[in-house]
Amino acid sequence: MSHSAVCEPGQKRPLRPGGGLRDSSEEQEPSCSQYFSSKAVTGNRLSSQFFNQQCVDLAKALLGKVLVRRHADGTELRGRVVETEAYLGGEDKASHSAGGKRTERNAAMFMKPGTIYVYPIYGIYLCMNISSQ
C-alpha cells in the first residue's frame, strides 16, 4: 500500500476503522501521511553544491531533509533523514574508505560529493552513504 497523498500542516490523518489483523486487500489507502507536509513534497531540490562540504557539516545539514525517488511509472518513495553519521575518509578506521583503499564495493566513496552508496548490512537492511569532501 502506498502513502502518496500528503496533509496540509495541522491537518489530521484520517483514522482507519477497526484494529488488529486484517486482510491487506480490505485496507483503503489513507488520504494523507502524517509524516510529510505538502512543503516537504514540493520543496526545492538540493544542488550539487549542497553536498560539497565537510562530512560532519553535511551530516548535520542532512537531518530533516526528505529524500525522494521518482520511478518511471510516476510512483514516489520518500524518506525523512532522522539519523546521520560522519566518517572522516581515509584516516577514519571505521570508514569503508579507510586507508584510501578503493574497491568495487566502495568506489562511490571516491566520487564527486553527493554520490550515493547503498549496501546491505546484517543481511536484511540497506544502509545509504552520501559522499562529501
Image (cartoon, rainbow, N blue to C red):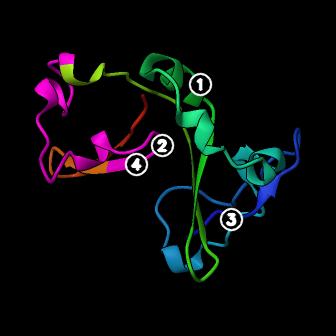
Using a 10 Å C-alpha cutoff, classify the residue at mark 3 as few (fewer than 14 neighbours), some (14 to 19) or many (20 or more). Answer: some
> Horizontal and vertical percent for residue 59?
48, 24
| Three-letter code for the amino acid on which mark 1 is drawn | Ala
Q: What is the CA distance from the residue labelled 3 to the residue labelled 4?
A: 24 Å
As drawn, is 32 to the left or to the right of 125? right
Report whether residue 52 is seen. yes
Within 10 Å of disc 4 (Cα), the crowding (few <14, some 14-19, many 20+) is some
In the image, taking residue 25 as reference, residue 127 lies left or right, namely: left
Residue topped by disc 1: 61
User: Which one is earlier in the sequence, the residue at label 2 or at label 1?
Assistant: 1
Segment colored magenta: 91-117
Earlier-in-chain disc, 3 versus 1: 3
Which residue is painted at 29% across and 40% down in the image? Answer: 109
Position of residue 64 measured from the top left corner of the image (x, y, whole percent): 63, 31
Looking at the picture, tell me which residue is in the foreground, 115 or 122: 115
Give the vertical position of 49 relative to 53 (above or below): below
Q: Nearer the viewer, residue 37 or 93?
A: 93
Q: What's the amino acid at mark 2?
A: Gly
Instruction: Give the residue type at disc 3.
Output: Ser
For the residues labelled 4 and 1, the Cα–Cα distance comes to: 16 Å
| Residue that numbered label 3 is attached to | 4
Residue at 58 percent across and 78 percent down: it is 26
Do the residues under discs 4 and 2 have CB atoms within 8 angstroms?
yes
The residue that appears at 50% across and 56% down in the rendered structure is: 20
Front: mark 3 or 4? 4
- The residue shown at (88%, 38%) is 10
Distance Cα–Cα, label 4 vs label 2: 6 Å
- Mark 3 or mark 2: name the one nearer the start of the chain: 3
Q: Secondary structure at mark 4?
A: strand
**What kind of secondary structure does the magenta stretch mostly adopt?**
loop
Q: Residues within 10 Å of mark 2 (few under 14, many from 20)?
A: many
**Residue labelled with disc 2:** 114
